[in-house]
Structure formats: structure tokens, C-alpha cells
Amino acid sequence: VMRSVVLGYGSYLPERILTNDELAKMVDTSDEWIVQRTGIKERHIAAEGEFTSHLGLKAAQAALANAGIDAQSIDLIVLATSTPDNTFPATAVAIQNGLGIHHGAAFDLQAVCTGFIFALATADNFLKSGAFKRALVIGAETFSRILDWNDRGTCVLFGDGAGAVVLEAQPQAGTTADRGILTTHLRSDGRHKDKLFVDGGPSSTQTVGHLRMEGREVFKHAVGMITDVIVDAFQATGTTADDVDWLVPHQANKRIIDASAKKLHIAPQKVVLTVDRHGNTSAASIPLALAAAVDDGRIKKNDLLMLEAMGGGFTWGSALLRW
Ligand code: ACO
């Protein structure tokens, strides 16, 4: 069977760090409130003139360097983003061009915070089918550009950044001991579309709009949806929580992550947390967390990783991956 194996990873964070104390000077909030409710201490904010494509390109270049492969061997680029440079063309083609690649296919995919899982699953299926050989899967966001900086209920939660992995189709035995993506599970339910959305867009208002969220409603559904798709991954592969070396969750909120891990009996020391330093970077949060935990030596080759996310739509999903 064909498996999509990770050849390399990379990430990029804008230089500028915005702390909770700085935010407290902009809106009526406090470091204490933000840390207690979300676990977030600081987040990175893109500079003026620094776009999603610039962050994504840097993460992609880092992933290619880490994999030790030539950009020209990439024939598929899937970019997960909800904050594209332009309405069109896809920001993925700007990244493709930045890498000097003029063959193969590059496109954007939009599933908000679950974007990276959707992109990973999409690339995985293209690779397994034989349609493409090597893929760059990127999550890149500049949520700072769509925040209402007067709304304390949302502006404290998000940050900017990008992360990427290089995947290659490789023939393998097909057991859970093989490296690569073992299974992916994607879900959406548009009944929840108005609980977390941007109140603008080309077709509706001809404006970019701002992020709007019913925080409590999101929180209420998050843990159940996340745990459902993780159980799907366990059932599809015959694995259990004990087999998982690392849970690499979408980094929205420490309380959601803690509650999900607890419900699944995944020990807290197996959970990768970066929300304290990155905030919620939407589609970029999982590859950013992956990069942080591989860089500091926690995630090692052949470790079994459970990736999960939930976000606007609602969308939610999981990916079980042997690193
Ligand atoms: N600082 C101080 N007070 C605040 C702030 C703030 N930044 N934001 C809201 N408050 C106030 C509210 O105005 C409210 O005051 P009131 O009681 O006087 O009306 C009070 O705090 C409680 O507000 P709630 O919204 O009920 O607070 P809650 O405990 O639910 O925490 C939060 C809010 C952190 C947004 C929480 O609901 C949450 O984490 N939800 C999940 C949302 C999320 O993570 N979304 C990310 C995108 S989706 C995803 O990625 C999964």
C-alpha cells in the first residue's frame, strides 16, 4: 500500500510579539483573565506588508531545507488558510511561485481552524492515489488582519504564523508500525456556521469583515467533536490512547485541550502545548506545534502522533500519523 510519509517540517513566526499586558492597554482585559480562560500569554503579529504568503513561503522553505530535498521535486502544494492575500488567486500559487515551482498544482483550502487536518487529508489522498508524488502541506494565517481590535472577547485569542510539512508517497507494508499518515477523519456541520464566522466577504458585502464568535457555544461543542474524531481514528486503526506518543492538538484554548485529553485518557505529559506563546493561529497551529515539539526533542522518529482540530463551520477532524 502507499503511505504519505513526512520527509520534513518547518515553521515561521513573525518577529513582533504582542503580550497580554500590551492588550490590556488596548481593551478592558488583563493578563490574569486571558491566562485563566485560555492559557494564552503572548502571540506573534505580522508586520505591515507581511502577508500570509510571506509567512507560508518561509515555513515551506524551512520544511524543504529540513527534508533536504529540492523544491523542484514538489508537485502538489495545498495551503490551508482563511486569511488569503487576495480573494483570488489562491495564496498557494504565490508560495509556489516564491519557491520557483512552475509545474504541478497549488491551491488553497479553507476549513478555518481545522484547515491543516483537511489539507493533510487532501494531500494524503492525492499521494495515495498516485496523482502526485511529493506534497507541501502548509497552514498559514494572518488572523490579526480580520480581528475586531475593539472586541475583547475575540482579539485576545488569536495570533499569526505558519507551519508546513513535506509528504512523500512511499510503498509500505500497511501496518500501524509503518511511518506516515495512518488515517484521517474529516467532519463538517453547517448548522453551526453562524457561531464563528467573518461578517464580510466578496459575494455578500464586498468587504473583508471581522471575526465574530459566540465563545461559549464554540466551547460547548469543541470537546465532544474533538473526542469523536479521535475515537474514529482509534477504531479505524485498532489503536488506543496508550499507543499515542503525542497528542498535537489545534491550539485554541488550553481548557479545551486539557478537557479533550482527559476525556480520552491521554496523559497531560503527552500533550503538546504552544497556545501560551502562539495564541490561536488557526490552520497554522498544528504544524507550528509539531515543529516546536520536534525541535525541542520531544517528538522523535517513529512516534505515533494524534493530530486534531475543531473550528468554524463547524469543521473538525483528526489525523493519526507515525512520524
Ligand atoms: N477580558 C476580560 N473579560 C472578558 C474578556 C477579556 N478578554 N472577554 C470576555 N470577557 C468577559 C465577558 O464580557 C463576560 O463579562 P460579563 O459576564 O460581564 O458579561 C465574561 O468575561 C464572561 O464571558 P464569556 O464569554 O462567558 O467567558 P468564557 O468563560 O466563556 O470565556 C472564551 C470566553 C475564552 C472565549 C471561551 O468561551 C472560549 O474559550 N471559547 C472557545 C472559543 C475558542 O477557543 N475559539 C477559537 C476559535 S474556535 C477553535 O479554534 C476551536
Image (spheres, rainbow, N blue to C red):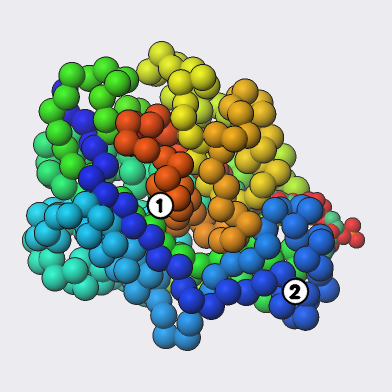
Visible in this render: residue 212?
Answer: no
Q: Name the residue under label 1.
A: 295
Which kind of residue does numbered mark 2 sit on? Asp
Where is residue 129, by image quadrant?
top left
- Residue drawn where x is 13% and y is 66% of the image: 101
Q: Which residue lies furthest to the front in this view?
A: 297
Q: Residue 21 carries which label?
A: 2
318 relative position to 268: left or right: left
Camera-nearest residue between 263 and 117: 263
What crowding class fits label 2: few (fewer than 14 Cα within 10 Å), some (14-19), or many (20 or more)?
some
Visible in this render: residue 257?
Answer: yes
Question: Which secondary structure, mark 1?
Answer: helix
Q: Which of marks 1 and 2 is in front?
A: 1
Q: Position of residue 103 (x, y in %)?
A: 9, 61
Q: Which mark is residue 163?
A: none
Quadrant placement of the N terminus = top left
Q: Position of residue 110 (x, y in %)?
A: 41, 54
What crowding class fits label 1: few (fewer than 14 Cα within 10 Å), some (14-19), or many (20 or more)?
few
Q: How far apart are marks 1 and 2 (CA)?
A: 28 Å
